[in-house]
Amino acid sequence: MNFKKNILITGSQGMIGKNIINDLLNKGHKVIGIDINDKANTDFDYYQCNLISTEDTVQVLKKIFSKYKKLDCLIHLAGIDYKLEKSNKCLDDFLNISKPSIVMESINSNISMVYNIIYSLMPYFLKQEKSKIILAGSLYGSISPNPNLYLDKNGEKFFQKPIEYSISKSVFPILAKYLCAHYGHKGLVVNNVEPHAIIDEPKEDFLKNFEKISPMKRTCKVNEIVDFISYLSLSECDYLNGQTIKIDGGWSSL
């Protein structure tokens, strides 16, 4: 039986965030949301914060802990997924990737967000008997996106998953391992979840390509990610620690 928990969720206004929040609220738990957007109509405690700023992150956590005293779990979903537009490409067709300025902006933003929230939480978490961090990474933090997914019927590329996204997400597995190795004995449980193919309104060509390659012949359903992250946040299986767990329908088995 799970006792009522206080769970902090960054990126609470995103698609996955909203679904996880609904799931946890329906199970009777207390949810505290953080997002950069203005407060929407919510049934949970919401704080607007720019996690790229260390100062803003520290201040918002002071407010949260002055109210709640204890948080059981952080679910970190916040991130920026830049799209590779023509205006951002290098001029050389053989180097069809983002310009360095775009790459560094994305990497700096995403790594700042995850590091700031963890760094600012650690003084609180390490005073608790037990605490948990769940990082929402991406399969593309471990393997490269398959360029064949983004070819139309004429063999022309209609999209490219930007390299900066993969670089940003590749930090998450080592974060989970490092924090587990150094703070597991203090009751900190940290795991990284790598979903794949959660896509809102995908192009028809993409779906056709995906079905040809995927072992399960379909993309991931939002509830499949929500169920697992919700399980991790509430589970008493604390010996699962420092791991990166892929939810990819067997994609990485190929």
Image: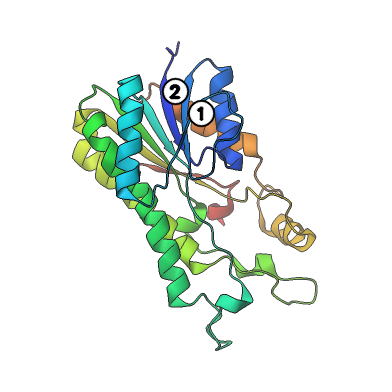
Closer-to-camera residue (185/116): 116
Query: In the displayed structure, would residue 66 be above or below residue 56?
Result: above
* Residue at horizontal 66 percent and vertical 40 percent from the top: 221
Dot 1 alpha-carbon crowd within 10 angstroms: few under 14, some 14 to 19, many 20 or more: some
Q: Quadrant of the C terminus?
A: bottom right
Q: For this view, does 85 lie left or right of residue 170?
A: right
Q: Looking at the image, do the residues carrying marks 2 and 1 touch, with CB atoms under 8 Å apart? A: yes
Reading the image, the residue beneath label 1 is: 230
* Residue at horizontal 51 percent and vertical 28 percent from the top: 230
* Residue at horizontal 71 percent and vertical 48 percent from the top: 218
What secondary structure is found at the residue carrying circle 1? helix
Query: What amino acid type is highlighted by mark number 1?
Result: Ser
**Residue 56 percent across, percent down from the top left:** 34, 44
Q: Quadrant of residue 73?
A: top left
**Residue 101 percent across, percent down from the top left:** 43, 74
Query: What amino acid type is highlighted by mark number 2?
Result: Leu
Q: CA distance from mark 2 to mark 1?
A: 6 Å
Query: In the displayed structure, would residue 78 be above or below residue 82?
Result: above
**Residue 106 percent across, percent down from the top left:** 45, 63
Reading the image, the residue beneath label 2 is: 234
Query: In the displayed structure, would residue 87 be above or below residue 58?
Result: below
Q: For this view, does 157 lie left or right of residue 11?
A: right
Q: For this view, does 67 lie left or right of residue 142?
A: left
Query: In the displayed structure, would residue 91 be above or below residue 248?
Result: below
What secondary structure is found at the residue carrying circle 2? helix
Colour mapping: rainbow
Query: Can I make out residue 241 in this image?
Result: no
